[in-house]
Each structure stands twice: as structure tokens, then as C-alpha cells.
Amino acid sequence: MPPLSDVRPIGIYDSGAGGLSTLRDIRRALPDEPLVYVADSAHLPYGEKSQEFLERRALAIADYFVSRQVRAIAVACNTATAAAIGTIRAHHPDLVVVGIEPAIKPAAQLSRSGVIGVFATHGTLASPRFAALAQRAAAGVRVVLRPCPDWVMLVENGQLDGDAARAAVDMAATALLDAGADVLVLGCTHFPFLLPLLRERVGPDLPIIEPGPALARQLAYRLRTEAPGLMAPAGYAGGCELLTSGDARRLGEQAMRLLQWALPAERLPATWR
């Protein structure tokens, strides 16, 4: 067990507020660890950005985390994972680096119709990493894709109910249901915040797989097996910091609205914005 002053944080980042859903999952899995969350909101949305841009932002944020002496980085963004997690790992081989990916394999195992549906951003769905994942994990199952860039901005703007959000969710869900999907995959960390509307449309029984819990389990497993001596002691109650390349006040408001967490947010230092 490290001295309390030597407990190093875990860095978590997303393009914006969507990764707050994964932050919540990580906090549940690792209740004692100090967490540092970065929302790259000045460059939102990631789904339409180039590979080069996403790699550049990934390295900038990873370098910030290194300056904070993190012991692990969680990429809480499907698009950034698809585009840049290999780059982060190559530049920081001494860190535990985990990313988030659509849960294709468990969805394929659950499906009875042989059709699963994936909601995600254009960037995720167009990536070679996603194509390889779908081919590897869903053999014999048809994967129906639905890009939902509008869902990202609905969550960012706090539109979690109302006519516009309901219409956007209904349209996307109907397309996948009409294609025969009997399991749905949320391929973006923003999307769990729209789960109540999605449940209204598909009912209580259709399996919907969220992205965050699997990442949280993987992160906890790797920390406990690869660096058990660096774990915070039970009851340490590590805090949670919020930073953003965008509007800090807005991120604090989003954390309250989406998580009911009253946390102040700060601007990411200019070097890494």
C-alpha cells in the first residue's frame, strides 16, 4: 500500500460530457481511487474529426495526464479509442491504458434473431478498428449500424427529454428494430444518458448494452493485477477533478445535470488545450 500522499490518480477523457457516464462506472468499480476527468469540449464533436486530429488530441491529453503522474488512462470515448488508443499506448508503454469499444461480442452472444444493432458516431463506425472488431466478434451475426451524431449534441445540450430528443431516439431505434435487431449496443459514452427515452421506444425487455461497465471492470482488473501496490487503501475516498478544454462552468453544470454530482470544473491548462 503506498503512503497516502503517493496515491496516483487515474486519468479519464472524452470528447465532452458523454464520458461522465463512464466516470460514474469507474467510480462504482474503484470507489477509493482519485480520478481526473478531462472533457475535450473545445474540439467537440469527435465523430467528424480526422484520424490525425484525434491522435494529436489524444497525445496532448495523455501528456497532461503524465504531468499529473497518473498511473492509468481510460479513454472514455469510442471514437478516440478507435482512432488513437494505439498511439497513446505506443507513447506511454509504462501506463495502463484502456479504451472503450462497442460491446459487439456480448450482443452477438445474446441475439436470437442473428441481428444486432449498433448506435455510434460516424467516426467509430468508419474506423478500421471497429470493422475488425465486428468481423472478429460477430461471426455469423448481422451487425446493423446506425450513426447518431445528433444524440451526442442532445446530451451535450442537456436535451434528455422533450420532443426533439424523443423524435431522434425513436427514428434511430425504429431503423434498427425494423432491420430485425433484437439486441442493441450503445457505441458512444454519451448515449447512456438517453437510455430512458430508448427504453420508452423499445420496451423493458430488449437487451441494451452500455459501454462503460466493461471498461470499468477491465480497468479495475488490470490495476489490481498489474499494479496492486499502487491501489488506494480502502476508505481513502479519492476525490474527482473535472477539467475541460472548453467552458469550465458548463462542464460543472453538466456533471450536476447528468450525474447529480456537485463538482467544480476547471479549465485545462493552455499547454494542453
Image (spheres, grey):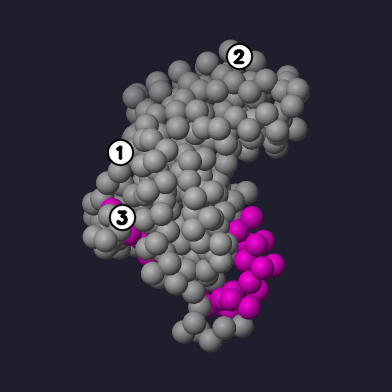
Dot 1 alpha-carbon crowd within 10 angstroms: few under 14, some 14 to 19, many 20 or more: few
Q: How far is the residue under mark 2 from the one under mark 3? A: 39 Å
Q: Quadrant of the C terminus?
A: bottom left
Indicate whether residue 15 is drawn in magenta.
no
Task: Name above or below for residue 53 compared with residue 37.
Answer: above
| Residue 192 located left or right of residue 254 | right
Q: Amino acid at mark 1?
A: Asn
The range drawn in magenta is 218-245
Dot 3 alpha-carbon crowd within 10 angstroms: few under 14, some 14 to 19, many 20 or more: many
* Closer to the eye: label 2 or 3: 3
Tell me the residue at 43%/67% (across/down).
66
Does residue 205 show up? no
Q: Quadrant of the N terminus?
A: bottom right
Indicate whether residue 223 is drawn in magenta.
yes
Q: Which residue is mark 1?
A: 157
Dot 2 alpha-carbon crowd within 10 angstroms: few under 14, some 14 to 19, many 20 or more: some
Q: State the image coordinates of residue 231 (x, y, percent, origin top left).
A: 59, 74
Corner quadrant of residue 206 = top right
Q: Amino acid at mark 3?
A: Thr
Tell me the residue at 30%/43% (across/down).
43
Q: Which residue is mark 2?
A: 179
Does residue 128 show up? yes
Q: Which residue is mark 3?
A: 244
Q: Earlier in the sequence, mark 3 or mark 1?
A: 1
Label tally: 3
Q: Which mark is residue 239?
A: none
Q: How far is the residue under mark 3 from the one under mark 1? A: 16 Å
